[in-house]
Amino acid sequence: MKKKRIVIALGHEALGTTLPEQQAATRRTAKAVADFIREDYQVVITHSNGPQVGMIHTAMSEFCRIYPEYTATPMSVCSAMSQGYIGYDLQNAIRTELLNRGIYKPVSTILTQVMVDPYDEAFYEPSKVVGRVMTAQEAEEEEKKGNHVVEVEGGFRRIVAAPKPMDIVEIDSIRALCDADQVVIACGGGGIPVLSQGNKLQGASAVIEKDLAAGKLAELIDADMLVILTSVDKVCLNFGTDEEEGLDTLSVEKAKKYLENGMFEEGTMAPKIQAAVDFIGESAIKSVLITKLNKDDGAIAGGMGTLIKK
């Protein structure tokens, strides 16, 4: 009998920010991953990288400022570095947890590139703020390089595009490892955004919305379920108001309607709902669970979260 295949998308809460936080968080997260493996699921993991890639970008920019003879590090390279940094801790934590339970299963991190459309409207309207706070002079130098900046409290910061994921370059490798019943970590931070230029892939100055990338990954490996771990227990209407209403279940039709009416905040819940709608499509079998990881024991308890189905 064919095993059910699940994609687990880890948010910031499941990873932490600093190195010690990340190591502790990945140990908790590994327990939830191991629970699914124990239930005989094939598991593919993707994750956020916001604090980590910001830290890397800031560090590399500061290094280049102090040592001008070194070339500045592109966003695509910073994204690749964050995939390795987070994947290293994740795969070791999961491997340890599985061995502690008497389960031997290889765990691998795949450096993953995600294709984006060079004509995506996002490139004309950058929206993602990244990197350190700069002075006016430094911001002017960035603009001379062709980069975009935005004024923030205390100075200026870079702002980059957030294009939609079109395809995953390493998808055949991911499928091969899944078919071999191995645990795969892929598309970290939404993947490394790349543009196709003939036979060459060129890194794009952008970041991809991680939830949309998770949905695309789940679609391309024909997963049965997508689990999005976030900072709230469940999807809510009128979030943060006196009329807040938590949803235990949600149909694709209602999800589309709520998206059209702007019921979910852009950059937080809206991309998660859009990823769910795109992944499920017209399928009567596929489902998406949006929930929070229990910090005490790393569990995803039954009945938690919002279950989305057709």
Image (tube, rainbow, N blue to C red):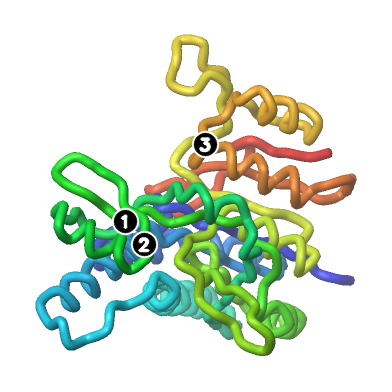
Q: Residue at x 60, y 24 (%)?
A: 263
Of residue 93 and residue 296, the one placed in the foreground of this image is 93
Q: CA distance from mark 3 to mark 1?
A: 20 Å
Q: Work out whether residue 31 can be spotted.
A: no
How far from the left and from the top, in percent, is residue 276?
70, 45
Label 2 neighbour load within 10 Å: few <14, some 14-19, many 20+? some
Q: CA distance from mark 2 to mark 3?
A: 23 Å
Query: Residue 137 occupies which quadrant of the picture?
Result: bottom left
Marking on residue 147: 2
Q: Residue at x 67, y 56 (%)?
A: 215
Q: Residue furthest front?
A: 144
Residue pointed to by mark 3 = 266
Asked if labels 2 and 1 touch by Cβ distance under 8 angstroms, the answer is: yes
User: Dot 3, how many residues are within 10 Å of its Cα: few (below 14), some (14-19), or many (20+)?
Assistant: few
Q: Position of residue 8 (x, y in %)?
A: 60, 59
Say which element carries label 3. Answer: loop
Q: Reading the chain from its start, which is encountered first: label 2 or label 3?
A: 2
Foreground tag (1 vs 2): 2
Drawn side of residue 275 relative to residue 145, left or right:
right
In terms of secondary structure, where does tag 2 sit? loop
Residue 277: x percent and y percent? Answer: 74, 43
The answer to whether the residue labelled 2 contacts the one labelled 3, judged by CB atoms less than 8 Å apart, is no
Q: Is residue 152 above or below residue 262?
A: below
Image quadrant assignment for residue 107: bottom right
Query: Which disc is residue 158 wearing?
Result: 1
Label 1 crowd (10 A; few <14 / some 14-19 / many >=20): many
Task: Spot the residue most to the top.
Answer: 242
Of the 4 image quadrants, the one containing the C terminus is top right
Q: Quadrant of residue 199?
A: bottom right
Up the image or down, 263 lies above or below 105; here it is above
